[in-house]
């Protein structure tokens, strides 16, 4: 049998190169489930059936049984089949002291998220956490960012969960790992790849000319996108208390809001859902910085906002197809409606300028560069920004794990160098679930920031003339994912 390997793209490789002892580069999520048919006679969760369910799905997720090796001299990583793959290492089982509160879940999630993945094994873990109140359980997932982006993560959720409450576990498909290339074979293939680059570049140029109607206009657009990208990337943001050297520890928290409420505000203000999210974050950051004594008048407070570059039919492909907007948040502006107006204008400008294309072009050029040169450019992603805000559209129907209904799906975004706060959102079954990742030292009061986000949205809705489901701004109802009454996720999100 011929050997097999799959070369990482330049963009995927940047997430490996960005990783340091204080910046683990995996994306995570917390899924909360009703016990359903997975409840055992003793009140626990049937971990054996969960492991069997993952085993039966592995043939649809080839990357989950692959690990990294590196090409000699060039030092470029590639994926190969792991002949020592053991599912028990990746699907882990822990229990909270009963009854496990949400605060206990937050603490164990923070510890799990802070740990690095083992690069000698496939880069993922699933932690099944039982012992939650009302006999519920959670699954905390960790997957290295070099394996997937947000859109691919949503597709992975559809692979591992079901839209129907079925309880059958199909038998696992037999798997035989393919031979791994030797260092000499990898080096030989890489030499041939570099030798054939001119021919492949010429073929790509001919295909490009055939696909693009106005080549001159497209080239002009791409040059402008690069100019706009570099103009922002080389313009530093201001120093703030949420920026600085990171520790090895993390705090994690969450919030649930109603998707219907967010859409009502969007309609009232004639903007996008993402504009509402960014305005909500702006209001919370304004209050948080003021509470920490920061003068806002001359502050350049910039967010990195990931933008998917995937085509509609490309969501199931592994790896990353994502760029970023660099967007200055108007934290000096006290009026929520004026904040929305400023953000709406800025996002419209970014769409028109196609700034996100600048990062895509850099990554295309980086495919030709050695890993050493690529490592020099990884700082671009963090130097010009203060925080990360990513919004991922998720499934709007209930999903099940072997008949156990998922109630909440809370995403987590990794922190980059000197960026102490990351905010990730995912919509699911009528709710929007916010996940907040904070450096343990830079953001010691992450719970306060979460409260300010909730208050900020309530103030924005009130200014827009929208009555939201939760009457009291700044309350804690939006952080409760384990109420005694069962029901759809949107009922949780509406308090």
Image (cartoon, rainbow, N blue to C red):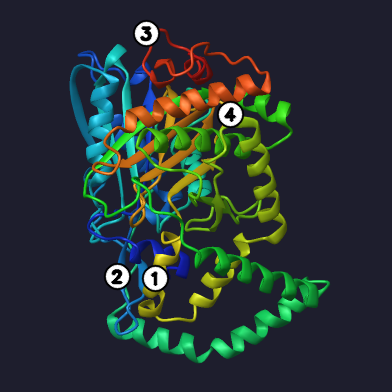
Image-quadrant location for residue 167: top left
Query: Vertical placement of 287 versus 35: above or below?
Result: below
What is the C-alpha distance between the residues marked 2 and 4?
38 Å
- Residue at horizontal 46 percent and vertical 56 percent from the top: 237
Relative to residue 285, is residue 419 drawn left or right? left
- Residue at horizontal 72 percent and vertical 28 percent from the top: 267
What is the C-alpha distance between the residues marked 2 and 3?
48 Å
Q: Nearer the viewer, mark 1 or mark 4?
A: 4
- Residue at horizontal 48 percent and vertical 56 percent from the top: 318
Secondary element type, mark 2: strand
Q: Nearer the viewer, mark 1 or mark 3?
A: 3
Q: Specify the label residue 69 is tagged with.
A: 2
Relative to residue 332, is residue 254 drawn left or right? left
Image-quadrant location for residue 141: top left
Residue farthest toward the left in the current orientation of the protein = 97
Q: Earlier in the sequence, mark 2 or mark 3?
A: 2
Q: Specify the label residue 484 is tagged with.
A: 3
Which residue matches tag 1? 5
Q: What is the crowding at mark 2: few (fewer than 14 residues within 10 Å), some, or many (at least 20)?
A: many
Which residue matches tag 4? 396
């Amino acid at each position: 049998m011929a050997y097999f390997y799959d070369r990482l793209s330049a963009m995927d490789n940047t997430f490996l190169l960005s990783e340091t002892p204080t910046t683990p580069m995996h994306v995570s999520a917390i899924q909360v489930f009703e016990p359903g048919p997975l409840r055992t006679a003793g009140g626990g969760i049937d971990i054996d059936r969960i492991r069997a369910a993952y085993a039966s799905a592995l043939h649809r997720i080839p990357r989950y049984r692959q690990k990294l090796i590196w090409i000699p001299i060039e030092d470029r990583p590639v994926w190969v089949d792991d002949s020592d793959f053991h599912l028990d290492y990746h699907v882990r089982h822990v229990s909270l002291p009963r009854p496990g509160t949400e605060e206990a879940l937050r603490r164990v999630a923070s510890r799990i998220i802070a740990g690095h993945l083992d690069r000698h094994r496939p880069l993922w873990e699933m932690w099944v956490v039982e012992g939650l109140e009302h006999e519920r359980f959670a699954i905390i997932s960790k997957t290295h960012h070099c394996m997937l982006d947000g859109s691919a993560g949503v597709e992975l959720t559809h692979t591992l969960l079901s839209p129907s409450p079925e309880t059958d576990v199909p038998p696992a498909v037999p798997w035989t790992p393919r031979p791994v290339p030797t260092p000499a074979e990898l080096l030989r293939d890489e030499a041939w790849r570099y030798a054939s680059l001119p021919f492949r570049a010429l073929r790509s140029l001919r295909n490009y000319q055939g696909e693009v109607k106005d080549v001159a206009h497209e080239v002009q657009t791409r040059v402008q996108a690069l100019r706009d990208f570099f103009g922002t990337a080389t313009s530093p943001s201001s120093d703030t208390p949420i920026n600085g050297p990171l520790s090895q520890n993390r705090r994690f928290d969450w919030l649930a809001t109603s998707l219907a409420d967010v859409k009502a505000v969007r309609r009232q203000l004639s903007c996008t859902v993402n504009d509402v999210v960014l305005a909500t974050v702006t209001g919370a950051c304004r209050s948080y910085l003021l509470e920490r004594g920061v003068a806002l008048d001359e502050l350049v407070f910039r967010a990195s906002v990931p933008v998917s570059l995937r085509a509609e039919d490309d969501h199931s492909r592994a790896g990353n197809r994502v760029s970023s907007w660099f967007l200055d948040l108007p934290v000096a502006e006290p009026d929520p409606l004026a904040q929305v107006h400023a953000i709406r204008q800025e996002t419209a400008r970014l769409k028109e300028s196609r700034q996100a294309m600048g990062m895509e072009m850099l990554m295309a050029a980086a495919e030709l560069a050695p890993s050493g040169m690529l490592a020099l450019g990884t700082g671009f992603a963090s130097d010009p920004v203060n925080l990360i805000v990513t919004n991922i559209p998720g499934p709007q129907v209930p999903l099940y794990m072997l008949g156990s209904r998922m109630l909440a799906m809370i995403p987590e975004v990794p922190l980059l160098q000197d960026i102490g706060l990351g905010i990730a959102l995912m919509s699911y079954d009528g709710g929007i679930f916010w996940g907040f990742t904070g450096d343990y030292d830079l953001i010691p009061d992450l719970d306060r920031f979460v409260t300010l986000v909730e208050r900020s949205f309530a103030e924005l809705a009130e200014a827009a003339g929208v009555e939201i489901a939760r009457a009291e701004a700044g309350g804690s109802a939006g952080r409760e994912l384990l109420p005694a009454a069962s029901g759809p996720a949107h009922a949780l999100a509406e308090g």
